[in-house]
Structures are given as structure tokens and as C-alpha cells.
Image (cartoon, coloured by chain):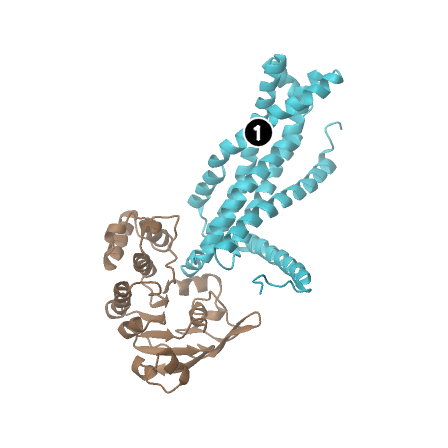
Chain colours: A cyan, B brown
């Protein structure tokens, strides 16, 4: 006799129903966040601690990512640009692609991996060990203490880390240029920013605040709603990473489309 | 509690519970696993809301309170969770300070004095700087109990306070429940299936079976009941 449960024909329909139910619950969670999350008590100290957790402890990871991407992008693009006699445009192309798209999205995805798993697992294990219930019965408002602080920390720190990743990405690109073509640093910088407008830098950096809020909200929601034991905690951590990453990419499409509608593209 | 009913999906866990606890007395709620004991006390602090029925705490309907009013009532109730539910990202002292800082006007020095007093009460003053991961099961329960009474609650709820403990720790925790009543005049509801704990701590016993209170009385009265479920539970 097999220990494996038999799959019922209605299972797929139930899974879809559960998925839709989950979306509804997430909507209610977000509504609760905005309705009650910004009242007293304000957890300033915990917010700073979370900003440290999100920010300071992610500098190395995002920095290395940025440096590597900048260098690799320069290496990969150089050959093609040389073919068209446009090697001088390399800094320009690097700045455009890193600051407008690769830097923000890569930073958000890397942070979704690190923070999504961390937040989902931490809050999930607090749920199964009844620590969240303990907060609630002690009138300590778990929504304010656990969720608002983490979401705000992500909202604030994602753009900061994006600027850092962008800077190191450009530095990586410059290093490659310096080694491969002895490019002058001043010339590199001057060329890099000629095609960028202030609105591009601002919008494409600040859009990561939205990505941060998505990562924070999704991970907190999945952690908060863990039911069961350690396996459920692991699943919440994994789902946090997957759902956050997918939503970040989808949100990017909407934000880019919206910014193009409002500000036009770089050529306009 | 008046005719409290609670279902999870298609499973009806509480099927009309009626129960009253006298002030400054300790009531034990006993019963086998999965009979709804923990679900029952979660209704007292509105961790769960009944599908129907009423939950009264003094002259307040706990199942209908919201916001600040609910918080105010919750602050007069202490809750000892099954695993202690100490915040594992904080030290023992921080676990207390977290609560005292937010709910009292005590200065930092006064808070330290209060933490030492509470740890002394459970005879674990040397664990001031320890972290929960370094504590034994019994120590966690005692420290969690000290944290639960940090704000001098009027009512204490114990969810399986002696589960997983050795007989010495069971006696120690049970005697602490008695001291709460004798020294601090607290009312307690103890969810347990531990006879030793009920023997030491309980003034009255409410036996729950299949989502209903089957028998009320002193431990001896309940133990000597002719109900087959009780005879089975007490091994007669």
C-alpha cells in the first residue's frame, strides 16, 4: 500500500480557489496595514533596527552584485560597440542601462532573496511559537511592531541601496574600461551622464521604494499567516522570495510604462 | 462563557461551552487532546472570536471589544503560552523591558528593579542576561510566567503550563500558580491534562469533552464522576 496520498480530480480546482483566497487575504492585509499600521504606538527604535538589518547588512551583497554587473556589462558590450565604431559610447550605455534598469531591478531582486526569506521565516517562526499571539495579548500591536517597521525599512532602504549598487556598477564598468582601453576616469564620468536626465535618475531610483514595499508586505503577509510547524515556516520563506521577485518584475513593467507616459523616454 | 461555539472549516471544536470562574480562584480545564481546551481560553483574550455565544470578563463582553478598549482589558490579563512564547530575538531582561517600557511610566532604573523582582519571584534572578535559547523548558515557563505577571494582571490564563516538563518542574510551576492566588489574589484558568498540576493548583475543575463541558466541581468530584469519558480519562 502506498503512503502517498492519491490526487483527487477536484484538487486543481481547490488549488485555484486557495490561490484566489490567498490574494483576497493579501488584499485585506494591505488594507489593514494602511488603516491601522500608522497609528500609535510608533516603533521608532525597531524601525532603526530594521533599517540597519535591511541596509547595513545588505551593503556587501548589493555592492558585489553592482560591481560584477558593471564589469560584465562593459565586457559584453565592448565588442559590439567596437564593431559599429561606437566604443566611446560605452560609458553612456553603461550609465543608461545600470541606472535606469539593471541597478534598480537587480538590487530589488537580490534584496527580495535575502530579505524575503529572512522576514518570511522570522515572522513565520514567531507565529508557530505563539510569539505573535503573545504580542497581541500584551497589547503590543504586532502589526505596528513587526510589519510596519519592516515594510518602512524596506521602503526607505531600497533606494539607498540602489544608489550604492548603481555607483559600484558604474565603478565596475569603469574598471573594465580602464583595464581594457585605459579610459580616463574624468572622460568616463563626463560621457556617462550625458544621456541621462535628472528625472530618469530620480524616478528609476525611487521606484525601488515601491519594490521595497512589495517585498516587505508580501514577506510579512506570508510569515504572518503561517499555519502549522517548521515545514510551513520553510514554505513561507520560499514563497516570500518567489512571490516578491515576481511582483517586483511585474511592478517594474507598470512603473516604467507610467514614467514613460509622464516623463517620456531619454530621446524626448 | 455563555454557549460559546467555534468551528474551523467544517470541524466544530466548541459546541456550546458554558463556564464560569469565581474571582481569586483557580479553575482547571481538563480533557483529552484535541477537545478544544486551548481554543477555549484563546476566546478569553480575543485571540479567537466565537461564531456564536458570549465571552464575559467582569462586566465587559470580550468578544465584542475593539481597539483601545480591547487593549486596556488585555493588559489586565496575563497569558502563559504552551511553549512560553518568549521573544527569542531578545534577552530575558529585554523580554520584560519590552513590555514594561511600553505599558508603564517606570524609569529605566525602576524597570531593572522590577525585572529583578520578577525574576527573583520565580527564583531565576541569575538568568537576567540569558537568552531564551539557553534556557531549559521549565526555566522558559517560569520566566514566561514572570513576564506574564509583570503588569499585575487580575486574571492569569495558563495553556498547558506543565506539558513537556519533568515532575520536579511540574510541581514547581504548579506551586507558582498557587502562589499567584495566595500572594497576589489572582484569578487563574489553567488548561491542563496533568493530574498533579490540577491536584496542586486547582480549586475547581471543568472537564471538557467533544467541545462541551461535561462535568464541573472539585477534582475529587470530577474524578469520581460516573461519566464513562471521565472514568476513561482518569484511568478507572
Is B12 rendered above or below residue A95? below
- The number of discs equals 1
Q: Which residue is rendered at x = 32% and y = 63% of the image?
A: B165
Q: Residue furthest bottom?
A: B226
The residue identified by callout 1 is A66
Chain for numbered disc 1? A
Q: Which residue is rendered at x = 47% and y = 56% of the image?
A: A127
Asked if residue B179 can be seen in this view, the reply is yes
Asked if residue A40 can be seen in this view, the reply is no
Is A102 rendered above or below residue B10? above
Could you tell whether A174 is left or right of A259 in the image?
left
Residue B57 on image: x %, y %: 40, 72
A139, A150: nearer the viewer: A150
Helix, strand or loop at disc 1?
A: helix
Could you tell whether B224 is left or right of A82 in the image?
left
Could you tell whether A187 is left or right of A59 in the image?
right
Residue B96 on image: x %, y %: 33, 53
Please identify the quadrant where the C terminus of chain A is shown.
top right
Quadrant housing residue B182: bottom left
Please identify the quadrant where the N terminus of chain A is shown.
bottom right
Residue A207 on image: x %, y %: 62, 38
Amino acid at each position: 500500500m502506498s503512503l502517498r496520498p492519491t490526487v483527487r480530480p477536484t484538487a486543481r480546482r481547490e488549488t485555484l480557489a486557495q490561490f484566489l483566497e490567498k490574494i483576497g487575504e493579501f488584499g485585506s492585509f494591505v488594507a489593514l496595514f494602511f488603516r491601522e499600521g500608522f497609528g500609535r504606538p510608533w516603533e521608532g527604535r525597531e524601525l532603526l533596527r530594521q533599517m540597519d538589518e535591511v541596509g547595513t547588512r545588505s551593503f556587501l551583497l548589493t555592492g558585489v552584485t553592482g560591481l560584477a554587473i558593471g564589469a560584465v556589462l562593459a565586457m559584453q558590450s565592448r565588442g559590439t560597440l567596437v564593431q559599429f565604431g561606437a566604443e566611446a559610447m560605452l560609458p553612456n550605455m553603461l550609465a543608461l542601462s545600470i541606472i535606469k534598469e539593471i541597478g534598480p531591478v537587480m538590487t530589488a531582486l537580490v534584496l527580495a532573496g535575502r530579505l524575503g526569506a529572512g522576514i518570511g521565516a522570522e515572522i513565520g517562526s514567531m507565529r508557530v511559537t505563539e510569539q505573535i499571539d503573545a504580542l497581541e495579548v500584551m497589547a503590543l500591536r504586532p502589526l505596528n511592531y513587526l510589519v510596519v517597521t519592516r515594510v518602512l525599512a524596506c521602503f526607505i532602504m531600497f533606494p539607498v541601496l540602489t544608489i550604492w549598487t548603481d555607483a559600484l556598477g558604474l565603478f565596475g564598468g569603469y574598471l573594465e574600461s580602464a583595464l581594457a582601453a585605459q579610459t580616463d576616469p574624468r572622460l568616463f564620468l563626463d560621457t556617462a551622464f550625458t544621456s541621462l536626465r535628472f528625472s530618469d535618475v530620480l524616478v528609476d531610483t525611487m521606484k525601488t521604494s515601491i519594490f521595497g514595499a512589495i517585498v516587505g508586505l508580501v514577506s510579512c503577509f506570508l510569515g504572518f499567516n503561517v499555519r502549522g510547524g517548521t515545514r510551513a515556516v520553510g514554505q513561507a520563506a520560499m514563497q516570500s522570495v518567489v512571490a516578491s521577485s515576481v511582483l517586483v518584475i511585474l511592478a517594474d513593467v507598470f512603473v516604467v510604462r507610467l514614467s514613460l507616459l509622464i516623463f517620456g523616454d531619454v530621446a524626448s | 462563557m455563555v454557549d460559546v461555539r467555534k468551528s474551523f472549516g467544517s470541524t466544530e471544536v466548541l459546541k456550546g461551552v458554558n463556564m464560569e470562574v469565581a474571582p481569586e480562584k483557580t479553575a482547571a480545564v481538563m480533557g483529552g487532546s484535541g477537545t478544544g481546551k486551548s481554543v477555549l481560553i484563546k476566546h478569553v483574550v480575543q485571540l479567537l472570536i466565537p461564531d456564536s455565544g458570549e465571552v464575559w470578563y467582569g462586566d465587559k463582553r470580550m468578544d465584542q471589544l475593539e481597539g483601545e478598549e480591547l487593549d486596556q482589558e488585555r493588559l489586565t490579563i496575563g497569558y502563559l503560552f504552551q511553549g512560553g512564547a518568549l521573544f527569542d530575538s531578545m534577552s530575558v531582561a529585554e523580554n520584560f523591558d519590552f513590555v514594561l517600557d511600553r505599558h508603564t511610566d517606570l524609569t529605566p532604573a525602576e524597570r531593572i528593579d522590577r525585572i529583578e523582582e520578577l525574576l527573583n519571584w520565580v527564583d531565576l534572578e541569575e538568568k537576567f542576561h540569558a537568552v531564551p535559547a539557553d534556557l531549559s523548558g521549565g526555566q522558559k515557563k517560569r520566566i514566561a510566567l514572570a513576564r506574564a505577571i509583570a503588569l499585575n494582571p487580575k486574571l492569569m490564563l495558563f495553556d498547558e503550563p506543565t506539558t513537556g516538563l519533568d515532575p520536579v518542574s511540574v510541581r514547581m510551576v504548579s506551586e507558582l500558580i498557587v502562589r499567584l492566588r495566595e500572594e497576589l489574589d489572582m484569578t487563574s484558568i489553567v488548561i491542563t491534562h496533568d493530574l498533579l498540576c490540577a491536584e496542586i493548583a486547582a480549586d475547581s475543575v471543568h472537564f471538557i469533552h467533544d467541545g462541551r463541558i461535561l462535568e464541573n466541581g472539585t477534582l475529587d468530584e470530577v474524578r469520581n464522576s460516573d461519566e464513562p469519558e471521565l472514568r476513561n480519562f482518569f484511568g478507572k
